[in-house]
Amino acid sequence: MLHQNKLKFVYGLLIGLFVFCSGCIEENKEIKQKEKPPNIIWLMAEDISLDLACYGMKAVKTPNLDQMALDGIKFNNAFVTNPICSPSRSAMMVGVHQVKTNTHNHRSNREVPLSKTYLPFTKLLRDAGYTTILGHYNVRGKGRKTDVNFKHEPVGEWNGKDKFGLFDKFDTINPADTPFFAQIQLNVTHRGDWWNEIRSQSEHPVNPEDVELPPYYADHPTIRLDWAKYLDTMEYMDDEVGMLYKELEEKGLYENTVVIFIGDNGRCNIRGKGYLHDPGLRIPLLMKWPKGIKPKQVRDEVVSSTDITATILDLAGVQIPKYMTGMSVLNDNFKRNEVYAARDLWDEIEEKSRAITNGKWKYIRNDKPEIPWDAGQAYLEFYRPAVHVMRTLKKEGRLNNFQKQFFENSKPKEELYNIQEDPFELKNLVDNPEFVAVLEEMRDKTLMYDSDMKPISDVYNPVHASAVDLLEWVKIEKPALYQEMLAGVEIGFQALTKEHSQLNKTN
């Protein structure tokens, strides 16, 4: 009997140890799963402001992005550091303000290596074991955009000396690539000849009568239609986001993939892309991670686009370099008081303006006030129907004081707006004595950032803007088409560029 009791005791002990160890194994599995780095997708929609339904835009349907906002975090005060694509993307690719890295002039210094002080953040991810992917999710089959102002190749190795590849590969996301980082372009919202095609194919094109125009636009049928076309592309882009999430689910990647959605700069229209007003700088920012981010969060603190770069490194478990001007928004100690933004060269327009925004106040300093907002930039002549229509209305005396501001012959040296009370930035408070203290504080902070972000070098190698030659060719060789442009018709920039290029080759 005693022998049998010993056997029972030993047997019970073994069973207990087995259960305990099994529990340890399961617990360790869970820990390993928790510690497994997430996949990260950075969705970058081109040329959009806060024009999603979840941000209150009227007449547009964006159910996939609205759901993303509900399932994760919606940021209300995210700003780019430059309202033009290549300087903005340069800042995000390095995590450092574009002025500091001397990448602030549009499509300049493309043969100049990035200073050895800095690295593309994709290099840091690759060193940490991530597969980095440059792709698009657009059924038009275009994208793969890098568009940064330093020497680079889209794909290949990087050492910053004779190898300048930013990503490992193009397009395809495979489970075998985990953990992966993918920067995916959603370029349908960028101005292009396809806007009419998108609208014609839509099963529910946006009704121009339903759109709500900002008060600095003239209420004109051509302008309403142009806005409706823009919203049509937003809906198309939203469908692409839905397609992406479906792919993640089908490949078993949904739960442990962080998706970050932003715009690369503001909408391509009056006061938007290219300008330091809110439609040029403020972008949507959504973040969703089923496994690691609680849903239904809305955050109002000020966020810079360089903070998104730092956040990606933080998610990947990569130490954020001290040289970065961005901070992780997922850090409990995250706090940004303001965003410093800059506008410099864009094609043939040698501009220089600086701005500070803190979510309540916006200050802009225009160092070249003699250059008007409506500067006649060749590229924009092809892509701003509202500008052509409103120029005519101004000549006819049919614009109100707010609408005329954009078309003055010069711009103020300084601008100050209370963007909480005046979200459309209609009332410049610079000369209002009640706000002298605010003006001086914002002015001083801008000067401080000017010093802190002083360019690391003065190399300046801009490229000639081909749109200048194209516009002159259209005026001379296609006068009837040019008159259509002046009436507010987009006459087909891409098609004309191709035709002009072929003629030059033939001649």
Image (cartoon, grey):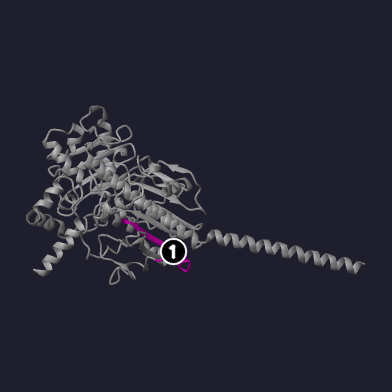
In depth, the one of 214 and 457 nearer the eye is 214
Q: Nearer the viewer, residue 179 or 191?
A: 191
Q: Residue 433 occupies which quadrant of the picture? A: top left
State the residue at coordinates (28%, 47%).
229
Which residue is farthest left? Answer: 476
Is residue 204 shown to the viewer in this render? yes
In reply to whether residue 386 is colored magenta, the answer given is no
User: Is residue 182 found inside the magenta-colored segment of the image?
Assistant: yes
**Residue 13 percent across, percent down from the top left:** 78, 64
At x 14% / y 46%, what residue is drawn? 486
Q: Crowding near pointer 1: few (<14 within 10 Å), some, many (20+)?
A: many
Picture quadrant of residue 466: bottom left
What residue sits right under mark 1 in the picture?
Answer: 180
Tag 1 secondary structure:
strand
Q: Farthest residue in the right direction?
A: 1
Q: Note whether residue 326 is visible.
A: no
Residue 362 image point, x, y percent: 28, 39
- Residue 351: x and y in percent read 17, 49
Total marks shown come to 1
Amino acid type at circle 1 is Phe
- Residue range (magenta): 172-187
Name the residue: 15% across, 52% down: 378
Up the image or down, 419 lies above or below 188; here it is: above
Residue at 27% over, 50% down? 82
